Amino acid sequence: MENGSFFQRAKRFLFGAPRDLFDPKIFHKVSLVAFFALVGLGADGISSSCYGPEEAFLALGSHTVLAIFVALATVVTVFIISGSYAQIIEAFPSGGGGYIVASKLLGERAGVVSGSALVIDYVLTITISIASGADALFSFLPLNWQAHKFAFIALILVLLIWLNLRGVKESVAALTPIFMAFMLSHVPLVLYAVLRHAPELPAVGARVSMEFSTTAKQLGWVGLGALLMRAYSMGAGTYTGIEAVSNSMPTLREPRVHTGKKAMLYMALSLSFIAGGIILGYVLNGVMPTQGKTLNAVLFENLMGSIWPGHTGVVIVAFVLASEAALLFVAAQTGFIDGPQVLSSMAVDSYVPHRFAHLSERLVRKYGVYFMSVMAFVMLFITGGSVRYLVVMYSINVFLTFSLSQFGMCIHWWKDREKEKAWRIKFAMNGVGFLLTASILCFTVWVKFPEGGWITLLITGTFIGMCFLVRRHYRKAQHALRRLDELLLQLPPVTVSSVQEPMLRRVAPTAAIMVSGYNGLGMHVFFSVIRSFPGTFRNFVFLSAGVVDSTIFKGAEEVVNLGTDLKKQLQNYEEFVKGHGYYAEARSEVGTDVIETIGHLAAGAAKDFPNIVFFSGQLVFQEESVVTRLLHNQTAFLAQKKLVFAGLPMIILPVRAL
C-alpha cells in the first residue's frame, strides 16, 4: 500500500470523509437546530452552575444564609443578560458576537479589545470546563487519585480536539446523551433540595432577616453591601456562556434569528432554575466545604443519604457527579465552536493570520481548533488546573466583552430611536445589562487583581497588542500588492478579433501559471516568465483554486457563485495572452484545501500538455522571519513540494513585497 493511500485512509477513518461542497443540503447538514444549539453552545452556560454557585456561596464565609439574596440576584441577572443578548441576535442575525457588535457600533479598536477578550475567554471556557469536570469526577474517587487529575484533564482535552476536527454537528450529536443525563439527574435533585424544606421556609426567612440585621451591625451597611457584591461577583462564572449563541449564529439552522432566540430562552430557563436552585439548596441543607469534594458533591450526598442510604445512594451520587463532569466536558465545546468563529472574523479583518478563516475538508475551522487547543494546554500549565484560579481569569474576560456589547447596543438603539418604535424598552434592557456587567467587571478586577486578575489582563493585553501588529503588517503587504494591481490599469486594451487566433499545439512548451484570481501578482508572474524565458513558451495555462473559507461558506449557492466569479476573472488572462499571439486557457476548481485543489488541476494540465512547466509567484520580504511565514501562506512552496514528488517541474518566481 502506498504511503499516500494509507495516510488518506487513516485520515478519513479518524476525521471522516470530505464534505460535498456542492450538496444543496450541505449547510442544513452541518447547522444546528435550537436543541443542538442548547447542547453545544448552551451547555457552557448551564454547566457553569457546577462552579459558579459554589464560588458565590464560599465568598460569603460564615454568612451563608445571605446566599438567598445572591440566588435571587442570579436568577434576575440570567434573564436580563439573556434578554439583552436576544436583542443582539435580532440586530445581528449573521453573527452578533462581541467582536462584530463592538466593531460596528463602537469602532474597530473596541472590536479588537472585545474580540481578544472573547478569544482568551473561550480558551478559558475549555480549560475551566475540563478542570471543573475533573473536580466533579474526582469528588467520589479516593483522595490519593488526585495526583492523576492533571493527566486526566489533558486526555479529555485531546479527545475533544479529535471530536471537533471531525465536525461541529458530529461532536455535539455525540455528546447529547450526556446533556440529557445531566438535566434528568439535576432537575429532580434541585427540586427535592428545595421542596423538602418547604415547611421550614418561614423559619428560614426569619434566619435570613436576623442574619441580615446582625451582619449590618457588624460590618455596617457599606460592609454588608460589599460582602454581597463580592459574593455576587465571585459567582459571575454562572453567567458565562450566555453570549455563546449570539457568537455562533452562522452555525444555526434557518431561520437563524428564531432558532437563536429559542435557544437563548431554553438556556435562560434551565440555567436560572439550576443555578438559583443549587444556591438555595446549599442554604436549606446546611452544606459545608469538605476537602477533596465540590459543594455539589456534598449537597447530593446529603440528599441521597436521606432517600437511599447505603450503596444505592452512593451509586446514584456517582452517576450524578459523572453526568456533571461529562456536561462540563461538553461545555468545553463552546470554546471549540465559538473561539474559531471569533478568530475567523478577526482574520477576515486582518487582525490575526488569514489562515484562521480557512476551512478543512470537513468544513471545520481547523486552524482555530489548533490554536484553542494549544492555548488551553498553556492555561492548564499556568494554573495547574485550579478552578478557583481559572474562574477569576474567566470572569474578567467574559464581562469585558459583555460590557462592550451592551454599551454598543445602547448606542445602537439611541441612534435608531426614530426608526424603532419600542426603542426605549430595548435601550433599557441593554442599559440595565450594561450596568450589571460593567459593575461585575469593575468589582472583580478590583478585588481579584492581586490574586490572579493581573495575569488575565496581561495575557489579554498582549493578545490585543499582537492583533494591532498583525494588522499593521498586513496593511504594508496590501500596499505592496496594490502597487502590483496598478499594473493592470497601465496595460493597453487588447482586441482579440484583430489578432489571429493562436493555434493550439499540445506538445509545444507550455507554462502553467498558478494565480489566485485576476490581479497584478498574476500578471507580474506572466511577464516574468516571458522576460526570463524569451521565445520558449507558446502555450499558457492559468490554474486557480477557489478556496471556500468561513466568509464564503453559507451553502452550496455561495460555493457555485465563487466558482463562477473565478472563471470570469480568469477569462481576462486568456483574452490578454491570446491578444499577444499566444495560446491560452484557464482552469479552476473550488475546494477547501488549496494545495489538494492545485495538485488536482496540475495533474490534469500535465496530462493534456506533456511538455509543461509550472510557475507561481511568492511574496518576498526584505526581513524574512517566522512572523512573515506565519502571516502569509506558503502555498507556492507547498505546491512545489507536491508537484516535485509527482514528477512535475515547478519554478517559484520571487515578487518583492516590502
Image (spheres, rainbow, N blue to C red):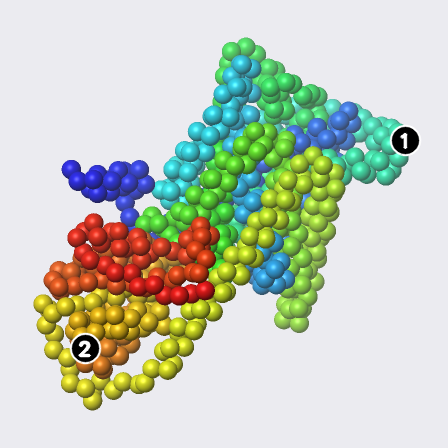
Q: Nearer the viewer, residue 536 or 73?
A: 536
Residue located at (33% from left, 48% from top): 362
Mark on residue 582? 2
Q: Which residue sits at x=61%, y=40%?
A: 394
Quarter of the image where one finds residue 610: bottom left
Q: Which residue is mark 1?
A: 217
Q: Residues within 10 Å of mark 2 (few under 14, many from 20)?
A: many
Classify 549 as above or below 386.
Answer: below
Residue type, numbered disc 1: Lys
Question: Which residue lies at the image location 29% right of the left edge and 48% below the top edge?
Answer: 18
Viewer-closest of 323 and 402 = 402
Using the rendered image of the protein, determine whether residue 468 is visible from the camera's viewpoint.
yes
Depth check, front residue: 61 or 35: 61
| Foreground disc of the pair 2, 1 | 2
- Compared with 22, 523 (above or below) is below
- Residue 323 in view of the camera: no
